[in-house]
Image (cartoon, coloured by chain):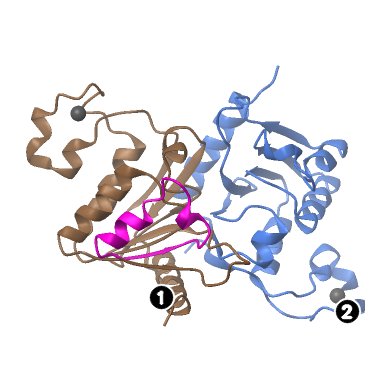
Chain colours: A brown, B blue
Amino acid sequence: GPLKEVLFFPSPSACVEHLYAPAGALSCSCPLPHGVDTPFARLLGHLLSAGATLDLCVFSFSNASLSRAVLLLHSRGVAVRVITDREYMTIVGSQIGTLRRAGICVRHELSNAVHMHHKFVLVDGKKLLTGSLNWTVTAVQSNKENVLVTEDPDLVGPYQEEFCRLWEASDPT
Amino acid sequence: GPLKEVLFFPSPSACVEHLYAPAGALSCSCPLPHGVDTPFARLLGHLLSAGATLDLCVFSFSNASLSRAVLLLHSRGVAVRVITDREYMTIVGSQIGTLRRAGICVRHELSNAVHMHHKFVLVDGKKLLTGSLNWTVTAVQSNKENVLVTEDPDLVGPYQEEFCRLWEASDPT
Ligand SMILES: [Zn+2]
Ligand SMILES: [Zn+2]
Protein backbone atom coordinates (compact mmCIF):
# COMPACT_ATOMS: atom_id res chain seq x y z
CA GLY A 1 0.00 0.00 0.00
CA PRO A 2 0.98 3.67 -0.10
CA LEU A 3 3.45 5.08 2.44
CA LYS A 4 2.06 5.80 5.91
CA GLU A 5 4.16 6.99 8.82
CA VAL A 6 3.71 8.94 12.04
CA LEU A 7 6.54 10.99 13.56
CA PHE A 8 6.46 12.15 17.18
CA PHE A 9 8.53 14.95 18.65
CA PRO A 10 10.62 16.15 20.45
CA SER A 11 13.34 14.59 18.35
CA PRO A 12 16.67 13.56 19.93
CA SER A 13 19.65 15.58 18.72
CA ALA A 14 21.63 13.87 15.98
CA CYS A 15 23.69 14.90 12.98
CA VAL A 16 21.72 15.34 9.74
CA GLU A 17 24.58 16.56 7.52
CA HIS A 18 24.45 13.39 5.39
CA LEU A 19 20.89 14.30 4.33
CA TYR A 20 21.97 17.59 2.77
CA ALA A 21 25.11 16.21 1.15
CA PRO A 22 25.11 12.39 0.99
CA ALA A 23 28.67 12.28 -0.38
CA GLY A 24 30.03 13.90 2.78
CA ALA A 25 28.26 11.59 5.19
CA LEU A 26 31.30 9.64 6.29
CA SER A 27 33.51 12.63 6.89
CA CYS A 28 31.42 14.70 9.33
CA SER A 29 33.30 15.43 12.53
CA CYS A 30 30.65 17.44 14.40
CA PRO A 31 30.03 16.53 18.04
CA LEU A 32 26.46 15.23 17.51
CA PRO A 33 25.67 11.50 17.37
CA HIS A 34 25.91 10.05 13.84
CA GLY A 35 23.95 7.28 12.15
CA VAL A 36 20.87 7.83 14.35
CA ASP A 37 17.46 7.65 12.67
CA THR A 38 15.46 10.37 14.46
CA PRO A 39 11.98 11.78 13.74
CA PHE A 40 13.62 15.02 12.58
CA ALA A 41 15.97 13.14 10.24
CA ARG A 42 12.95 11.33 8.78
CA LEU A 43 11.07 14.64 8.35
CA LEU A 44 14.09 16.15 6.57
CA GLY A 45 14.47 13.06 4.41
CA HIS A 46 10.86 13.31 3.23
CA LEU A 47 11.30 17.01 2.39
CA LEU A 48 14.59 16.46 0.58
CA SER A 49 13.01 13.69 -1.51
CA ALA A 50 11.18 16.40 -3.51
CA GLY A 51 12.14 16.28 -7.18
CA ALA A 52 9.63 18.66 -8.79
CA THR A 53 7.51 20.67 -6.32
CA LEU A 54 7.34 21.57 -2.63
CA ASP A 55 4.17 23.31 -1.42
CA LEU A 56 4.58 24.45 2.18
CA CYS A 57 1.83 25.97 4.32
CA VAL A 58 3.17 26.80 7.77
CA PHE A 59 2.24 29.25 10.53
CA SER A 60 5.77 29.97 11.80
CA PHE A 61 9.10 29.18 10.16
CA SER A 62 12.26 29.98 12.10
CA ASN A 63 14.12 26.64 12.00
CA ALA A 64 17.43 27.15 10.12
CA SER A 65 17.88 23.44 9.36
CA LEU A 66 14.49 23.36 7.64
CA SER A 67 15.25 26.63 5.85
CA ARG A 68 18.50 25.09 4.59
CA ALA A 69 16.53 22.15 3.20
CA VAL A 70 14.09 24.42 1.38
CA LEU A 71 16.93 26.54 -0.03
CA LEU A 72 18.71 23.39 -1.20
CA LEU A 73 15.58 22.18 -3.01
CA HIS A 74 15.19 25.61 -4.62
CA SER A 75 18.82 25.51 -5.80
CA ARG A 76 18.16 22.08 -7.34
CA GLY A 77 15.33 23.55 -9.42
CA VAL A 78 12.43 22.26 -7.32
CA ALA A 79 9.46 24.68 -7.61
CA VAL A 80 8.93 25.83 -4.02
CA ARG A 81 5.81 27.74 -2.91
CA VAL A 82 5.37 28.91 0.69
CA ILE A 83 2.20 30.20 2.39
CA THR A 84 2.69 31.59 5.88
CA ASP A 85 1.12 33.76 8.57
CA ARG A 86 1.17 37.50 8.07
CA GLU A 87 2.02 38.30 11.68
CA TYR A 88 4.56 35.53 12.36
CA MET A 89 6.53 36.00 9.13
CA THR A 90 8.16 39.13 10.56
CA ILE A 91 9.11 37.89 14.06
CA VAL A 92 12.74 37.72 15.10
CA GLY A 93 14.39 34.61 13.68
CA SER A 94 11.84 34.10 10.92
CA GLN A 95 13.37 32.44 7.85
CA ILE A 96 10.79 33.92 5.47
CA GLY A 97 12.97 36.89 4.52
CA THR A 98 15.88 34.56 3.73
CA LEU A 99 13.67 32.46 1.47
CA ARG A 100 12.34 35.53 -0.33
CA ARG A 101 15.84 36.95 -0.88
CA ALA A 102 16.82 33.61 -2.45
CA GLY A 103 13.98 34.02 -4.95
CA ILE A 104 11.44 31.64 -3.41
CA CYS A 105 7.77 32.57 -3.86
CA VAL A 106 6.17 33.34 -0.50
CA ARG A 107 2.57 34.43 0.08
CA HIS A 108 0.75 35.19 3.29
CA GLU A 109 -2.79 35.51 4.56
CA LEU A 110 -3.95 38.98 3.49
CA SER A 111 -6.24 39.69 6.45
CA ASN A 112 -4.56 40.69 9.67
CA ALA A 113 -7.60 39.56 11.68
CA VAL A 114 -7.06 35.82 11.17
CA HIS A 115 -4.17 33.39 11.43
CA MET A 116 -2.94 31.02 8.75
CA HIS A 117 -2.42 28.23 11.29
CA HIS A 118 -1.81 25.22 9.02
CA LYS A 119 1.34 23.15 9.30
CA PHE A 120 1.36 20.93 6.24
CA VAL A 121 3.58 20.32 3.24
CA LEU A 122 3.06 18.55 -0.08
CA VAL A 123 6.04 16.86 -1.73
CA ASP A 124 5.76 16.48 -5.51
CA GLY A 125 1.96 16.66 -5.10
CA LYS A 126 2.07 13.03 -3.96
CA LYS A 127 3.22 12.99 -0.34
CA LEU A 128 1.50 14.87 2.51
CA LEU A 129 3.10 15.77 5.84
CA THR A 130 0.63 17.33 8.30
CA GLY A 131 0.31 17.77 12.04
CA SER A 132 0.96 20.11 14.94
CA LEU A 133 4.61 20.91 14.19
CA ASN A 134 5.53 24.49 13.40
CA TRP A 135 8.89 24.92 11.69
CA THR A 136 10.71 26.21 14.78
CA VAL A 137 13.59 24.84 16.83
CA THR A 138 11.42 24.60 19.94
CA ALA A 139 8.81 22.49 18.15
CA VAL A 140 11.44 20.03 16.88
CA GLN A 141 13.66 19.83 19.97
CA SER A 142 11.36 20.50 22.94
CA ASN A 143 7.62 20.27 22.37
CA LYS A 144 5.31 17.28 22.22
CA GLU A 145 4.34 17.32 18.52
CA ASN A 146 3.20 15.01 15.73
CA VAL A 147 3.56 14.79 11.96
CA LEU A 148 1.51 12.33 9.92
CA VAL A 149 3.04 11.29 6.59
CA THR A 150 0.88 9.71 3.89
CA GLU A 151 0.79 9.11 0.16
CA ASP A 152 -2.91 8.17 0.21
CA PRO A 153 -4.44 10.12 -2.70
CA ASP A 154 -7.74 10.47 -0.79
CA LEU A 155 -5.89 12.50 1.86
CA VAL A 156 -3.24 14.19 -0.32
CA GLY A 157 -5.88 15.43 -2.78
CA PRO A 158 -7.91 17.64 -0.41
CA TYR A 159 -4.76 19.25 1.03
CA GLN A 160 -3.38 19.95 -2.46
CA GLU A 161 -6.70 21.57 -3.44
CA GLU A 162 -6.71 23.63 -0.24
CA PHE A 163 -3.12 24.73 -0.89
CA CYS A 164 -4.02 25.92 -4.41
CA ARG A 165 -7.15 27.66 -3.09
CA LEU A 166 -5.14 29.49 -0.40
CA TRP A 167 -2.37 30.29 -2.90
CA GLU A 168 -4.85 32.02 -5.20
CA ALA A 169 -6.65 33.72 -2.30
CA SER A 170 -3.31 35.09 -1.04
CA ASP A 171 -2.29 36.62 -4.37
CA PRO A 172 -1.34 40.19 -3.46
CA THR A 173 -1.74 41.52 -7.03
CA GLY B 1 -12.33 1.05 2.95
CA PRO B 2 -12.05 2.71 6.36
CA LEU B 3 -13.37 6.26 6.88
CA LYS B 4 -11.14 9.08 5.57
CA GLU B 5 -12.11 12.73 5.63
CA VAL B 6 -10.42 16.13 5.71
CA LEU B 7 -12.06 19.17 7.33
CA PHE B 8 -10.89 22.72 6.60
CA PHE B 9 -11.59 25.76 8.72
CA PRO B 10 -12.78 28.46 9.32
CA SER B 11 -16.24 26.93 9.51
CA PRO B 12 -19.33 28.95 8.55
CA SER B 13 -21.67 29.68 11.46
CA ALA B 14 -24.60 27.28 11.67
CA CYS B 15 -26.77 25.77 14.37
CA VAL B 16 -25.43 22.53 15.90
CA GLU B 17 -28.13 22.03 18.56
CA HIS B 18 -29.44 18.91 16.82
CA LEU B 19 -26.10 17.20 17.37
CA TYR B 20 -26.33 17.52 21.16
CA ALA B 21 -30.00 16.58 21.36
CA PRO B 22 -31.27 14.90 18.18
CA ALA B 23 -34.88 14.85 19.42
CA GLY B 24 -34.99 18.64 19.62
CA ALA B 25 -33.60 19.25 16.15
CA LEU B 26 -36.82 20.40 14.55
CA SER B 27 -37.78 22.82 17.25
CA CYS B 28 -34.71 25.07 17.45
CA SER B 29 -35.57 28.73 16.94
CA CYS B 30 -32.10 30.26 17.29
CA PRO B 31 -31.09 32.83 14.66
CA LEU B 32 -28.33 30.71 13.09
CA PRO B 33 -28.81 28.85 9.77
CA HIS B 34 -30.20 25.32 10.25
CA GLY B 35 -29.65 22.15 8.28
CA VAL B 36 -26.19 23.24 7.09
CA ASP B 37 -23.41 20.64 7.05
CA THR B 38 -20.32 22.60 8.15
CA PRO B 39 -16.81 21.41 9.00
CA PHE B 40 -17.50 22.23 12.66
CA ALA B 41 -20.75 20.22 12.61
CA ARG B 42 -18.84 17.27 11.15
CA LEU B 43 -16.11 17.61 13.81
CA LEU B 44 -18.76 17.66 16.56
CA GLY B 45 -20.54 14.71 14.98
CA HIS B 46 -17.36 12.61 15.03
CA LEU B 47 -16.73 13.49 18.68
CA LEU B 48 -20.32 12.78 19.75
CA SER B 49 -20.17 9.39 18.02
CA ALA B 50 -18.00 8.15 20.92
CA GLY B 51 -19.64 5.25 22.74
CA ALA B 52 -16.88 3.99 25.03
CA THR B 53 -13.79 6.23 25.18
CA LEU B 54 -12.60 9.68 24.18
CA ASP B 55 -8.86 10.40 24.47
CA LEU B 56 -8.14 14.07 23.84
CA CYS B 57 -4.68 15.60 23.58
CA VAL B 58 -4.97 19.35 22.94
CA PHE B 59 -2.75 22.38 23.56
CA SER B 60 -5.52 24.90 24.29
CA PHE B 61 -9.19 24.27 25.07
CA SER B 62 -11.47 27.29 25.47
CA ASN B 63 -14.30 26.48 23.01
CA ALA B 64 -17.55 26.14 25.00
CA SER B 65 -19.35 24.17 22.25
CA LEU B 66 -16.58 21.56 22.31
CA SER B 67 -16.58 21.57 26.12
CA ARG B 68 -20.33 20.92 26.05
CA ALA B 69 -19.74 17.92 23.77
CA VAL B 70 -17.10 16.47 26.09
CA LEU B 71 -19.32 17.01 29.16
CA LEU B 72 -22.24 15.33 27.36
CA LEU B 73 -20.09 12.29 26.54
CA HIS B 74 -18.94 12.14 30.16
CA SER B 75 -22.56 12.26 31.35
CA ARG B 76 -23.36 9.36 28.99
CA GLY B 77 -20.69 7.24 30.67
CA VAL B 78 -18.00 7.59 28.00
CA ALA B 79 -14.53 7.33 29.61
CA VAL B 80 -12.94 10.70 28.81
CA ARG B 81 -9.23 11.41 29.29
CA VAL B 82 -7.71 14.81 28.53
CA ILE B 83 -4.03 15.76 28.20
CA THR B 84 -3.33 19.46 27.84
CA ASP B 85 -0.65 22.11 28.12
CA ARG B 86 0.43 23.19 31.59
CA GLU B 87 0.62 26.88 30.75
CA TYR B 88 -2.48 27.21 28.56
CA MET B 89 -4.78 25.27 30.87
CA THR B 90 -4.98 28.27 33.20
CA ILE B 91 -5.55 31.07 30.70
CA VAL B 92 -8.77 33.09 30.77
CA GLY B 93 -11.61 31.17 29.13
CA SER B 94 -9.97 27.77 29.47
CA GLN B 95 -12.54 24.97 29.79
CA ILE B 96 -10.14 22.68 31.66
CA GLY B 97 -11.38 23.74 35.12
CA THR B 98 -14.99 23.09 34.08
CA LEU B 99 -14.07 19.59 32.86
CA ARG B 100 -12.20 18.82 36.09
CA ARG B 101 -15.08 20.04 38.28
CA ALA B 102 -17.39 17.70 36.33
CA GLY B 103 -15.14 14.78 37.30
CA ILE B 104 -13.27 14.35 34.01
CA CYS B 105 -9.66 13.14 34.29
CA VAL B 106 -7.23 15.81 33.05
CA ARG B 107 -3.46 15.56 33.02
CA HIS B 108 -0.87 18.02 31.77
CA GLU B 109 2.75 18.09 30.75
CA LEU B 110 4.73 18.17 34.00
CA SER B 111 7.66 20.25 32.75
CA ASN B 112 7.08 23.97 32.43
CA ALA B 113 9.94 24.25 29.92
CA VAL B 114 8.11 22.51 27.05
CA HIS B 115 4.70 22.73 25.40
CA MET B 116 2.26 19.88 24.88
CA HIS B 117 1.38 21.13 21.40
CA HIS B 118 -0.63 18.19 20.01
CA LYS B 119 -4.17 18.64 18.72
CA PHE B 120 -5.52 15.11 18.26
CA VAL B 121 -8.36 13.02 19.60
CA LEU B 122 -9.11 9.31 19.53
CA VAL B 123 -12.74 8.19 19.45
CA ASP B 124 -13.36 4.68 20.84
CA GLY B 125 -9.72 3.87 20.05
CA LYS B 126 -10.75 3.47 16.41
CA LYS B 127 -11.11 6.93 14.91
CA LEU B 128 -8.36 9.56 14.83
CA LEU B 129 -8.88 13.31 14.36
CA THR B 130 -5.59 15.23 14.04
CA GLY B 131 -4.42 18.53 12.60
CA SER B 132 -3.68 22.15 13.38
CA LEU B 133 -6.93 23.01 15.15
CA ASN B 134 -6.78 24.03 18.79
CA TRP B 135 -10.09 23.83 20.64
CA THR B 136 -10.72 27.58 20.65
CA VAL B 137 -13.42 29.75 19.08
CA THR B 138 -10.87 31.64 16.98
CA ALA B 139 -9.51 28.41 15.49
CA VAL B 140 -12.98 27.20 14.49
CA GLN B 141 -14.48 30.49 13.30
CA SER B 142 -11.55 32.58 12.02
CA ASN B 143 -8.29 30.77 11.35
CA LYS B 144 -7.14 28.71 8.39
CA GLU B 145 -6.98 25.24 9.97
CA ASN B 146 -7.23 21.55 9.08
CA VAL B 147 -8.38 18.33 10.73
CA LEU B 148 -7.70 14.95 9.18
CA VAL B 149 -10.12 12.16 10.15
CA THR B 150 -9.17 8.52 9.64
CA GLU B 151 -10.03 5.04 10.87
CA ASP B 152 -6.92 3.52 9.29
CA PRO B 153 -5.45 1.28 12.04
CA ASP B 154 -1.92 1.98 10.77
CA LEU B 155 -2.43 5.67 11.65
CA VAL B 156 -4.76 5.33 14.65
CA GLY B 157 -2.41 2.85 16.34
CA PRO B 158 0.66 5.10 16.71
CA TYR B 159 -1.45 8.01 18.04
CA GLN B 160 -3.18 5.73 20.57
CA GLU B 161 0.21 4.45 21.74
CA GLU B 162 1.51 8.01 22.02
CA PHE B 163 -1.56 9.05 24.00
CA CYS B 164 -1.04 6.22 26.48
CA ARG B 165 2.69 7.02 26.74
CA LEU B 166 1.96 10.71 27.44
CA TRP B 167 -0.85 9.77 29.87
CA GLU B 168 1.56 7.67 31.93
CA ALA B 169 4.35 10.24 31.66
CA SER B 170 1.98 12.96 32.92
CA ASP B 171 0.86 11.03 35.98
CA PRO B 172 1.33 13.53 38.83
CA THR B 173 1.41 10.87 41.58
ZN1 LIG C 1 27.93 15.44 12.06
ZN1 LIG D 1 -30.73 26.58 16.13
Residue drawn at (29%, 45%) of the image: A44
Res B79 → quadrant: top right
Instruction: Answer above or below: position of A137 versus A49.
Output: above
Q: Are marks 2 and 1 on the same chain?
A: no
- Rendered image: mark on residue A131: none
Residue labelled with disc 1: A164
Q: Which segment did they paint magenta?
A: A81-104
Specify the amino acid type for callout 2: Leu
Local packing at callout 2 (Cα closer than 10 Å; few below 14, some 14-19, many 20+) is: few
Instruction: Answer above or below: position of B26 versus B154.
Output: below
Instruction: Give how far across and how far down residue A151 sits, in percent.
Output: 34, 60
Instruction: Give how far across and how far down residue B146 sits, in percent.
Output: 54, 62
Instruction: Give how far across and how far down residue A132 sits, in percent.
Output: 51, 49
Q: Is residue A96 magenta?
A: yes
Q: Is residue B101 left or right of residue B37?
A: right
- Rendered image: mark on residue B26: 2
Is residue B16 in sight in this rendering?
yes
Specify the amino acid type for callout 1: Cys
Q: Is mark 1 within 8 Å of ligand 2?
A: no
**Ligand 2 is in which quadrant of the figure?**
bottom right
Tell me the subunit letter for badge 2: B
Res A76 → quadrant: bottom left
Q: Of the residues tagged 2 and 1, which is closer to the observer?
A: 1
Local packing at callout 1 (Cα closer than 10 Å; few below 14, some 14-19, many 20+) is: few
